[in-house]
Amino acid sequence: MFCRNCGRELDAQAVACTGCGVPPLKGKKFCQNCGQPANEAAEICTSCGVRLAGSSAIGNINLPSANGIDVRQMVASYGKFVLLGIAFIVVITVMSTCGPVLWGIIPVSGLLWALIRVLNKPK
């Protein structure tokens, strides 16, 4: 491994460069794989082809829109249906395992209706 700030060769477990004192992958001047000078705006090293550590392409993903609806908004709106499904499964599991004891105590339809009303309450 090479320091991205000064290009000095380092041990793979190095926490900081012994030449410049900077964490090895924090700089942008050299390739961490081959130690050759690198363009600070580059995504890959032009000498060895390795993706440069800390390049901006990693982690910057723009989610697309589907018919004008943001994907994050769409996922958030389906969250209540997932919660309702989990609650339904829990109720059915409890009712089937505890059976006769709980049939008279918990009105299943009332519980599910209350869950639906809570989840569909306008914000």
Image (cartoon, grey):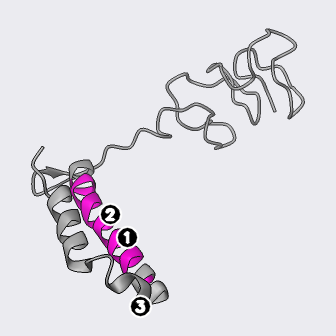
Q: Nearer the viewer, residue 2 or 98?
A: 98
Foreground: disc 1 or disc 3: 3
Q: Which residues are magenta?
A: 74-93
Q: Dots 1 and 2: beta carbons under 8 Å?
A: yes
Say what amino acid the circle numbered 2 marks: Leu
Instruction: Decide whether residue 88 is among the magenta residues.
Output: yes
Residue indicated by mark 1: 86
Residue 111, given in percent of the width and then of the height, sits at 25, 70
Residue 84 vertical placement versus 101 (above, below): above
Q: Nearer the viewer, residue 60 or 86?
A: 86
Q: Secondary structure at mark 1?
A: helix
| Circle 3: element type | helix
First along the sequence among labels 3 and 2: 2
From the image, tell me which residue sits under label 2: 83
Q: Could you tell me which quadrant the N terminus lies in?
A: top right
Q: Which mark is residue 78?
A: none
Tag of residue 100: 3
User: Amino acid type of disc 1?
Assistant: Ile
The quadrant of the rendering that contains the C terminus is top left
Choose mark 3 or mark 2, whichever is in front.
3
Disc 2 crowd, CA 10 A, few/some/many (<14, 14-19, 20+): few
User: What residue do we see at 28% from left, 67% from top?
Assistant: 84
Residue 78 falls inside the magenta stretch:
yes
In the rendered image, which quarter is residue 99 located in?
bottom left
